[in-house]
Amino acid sequence: MAKKKKHVPLPILAAGNSVIDTHCHLDMADYLEDLDLVVDRAFSAGVSKIITVGIDVASSRAAAEIAGRYESVWATVGIHPHNVHGVTEEDYQQIFEIASLPKVVAYGEVGMDLVKQYAPVALQKEHFRKQLRLAKELDLPLIIHDREAHEDILAILKEEAPFPARGVMHCFSGDVALAREMERFDFMISLPGIVTYNNADITRQVACEVSLDNLIVETDGPYLSPVPKRGKRNEPLFVLYTAAFIAQLRNISVDEVATRTTQNAENLFRLK
């Protein structure tokens, strides 16, 4: 007989406290049937704001449209490194136009991915640089995607610095040393549900050692559900599990993690 899984209750925040899911993809088909419920569940449980992230022209437009439907949802624009093949100047003109909409608060996700390499490395670098410059022109903070591309991304950031609107290394997968490098750019470190996984020792070390002044949290939904929801569709509600786990690692309250990461996100994305 299969052993029944133990129910893990959702962390409860103190009255008036909240957390922000700084990175989710609400436009994806995984949420097509129940997006209203997904958003309502999150807001009812203490998630005060959600940022839904663009990865190409179509999803950037969809993100802005979704943000327009919900008071506490914001959007970003950008072209993900998986999607840079075949991108034209007309595409960038559309991105620029979408970025002017009132609830667009960041540029990304952009960056490099040396794991899947859906686009050649040289092309990824070219479009990464182009979008770093466009983000500065638009005065938007950056959301950076980095999979096994730490050295390349760090080198390009150093060459293209400074970044007055700052930014965040989303779904952080580096070590403490890389986190320190990002802090020198005044970038945030964003931790997803991966930090709850048993094999995530390096990410857990980052969660413990990086200052709370430089941490934010995310789901990257519909991907990377935290324990105890691993294997299921991720959704903004589950960012509470990630915040609670970080609190446990640091031996502080979940309310302190929620308060500090919320302040950080509101400052970075100018949500107040």
Image (cartoon, rainbow, N blue to C red):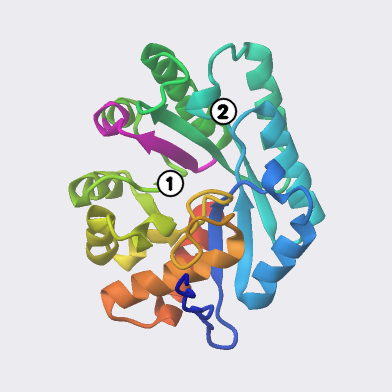
| Residue 164 quadrant | top left
Query: For the point 38% across and 71% down, which residue is it?
Result: 245
- Precedes in sequence: disc 2 or disc 1: 2
Residue 79 tag number: 2
| Vertical side of 161 occupied by 196: above or below | below
Whole-angstrom CA distance, mark 2 to mark 1, is: 14 Å
Q: Which residues are magenta?
A: 140-154
Query: For the point 41% across and 13% down, which residue is it?
Result: 120
Where in the figure is residue 113, as x and y percent of width and height? Answer: 39, 28
Residue 232 in magenta? no
Badge 1 amino acid: His
Label 1: how many Cα within 10 Å (few below 14, some 14–19, many 20+): many
> Element at badge 2?
loop
Given residues 39 and 161, the one toward you in this image is: 39
Where in the figure is residue 77, as x and y percent of width and height? Answer: 62, 36
Given residues 121 and 74, the one toward you in this image is: 121
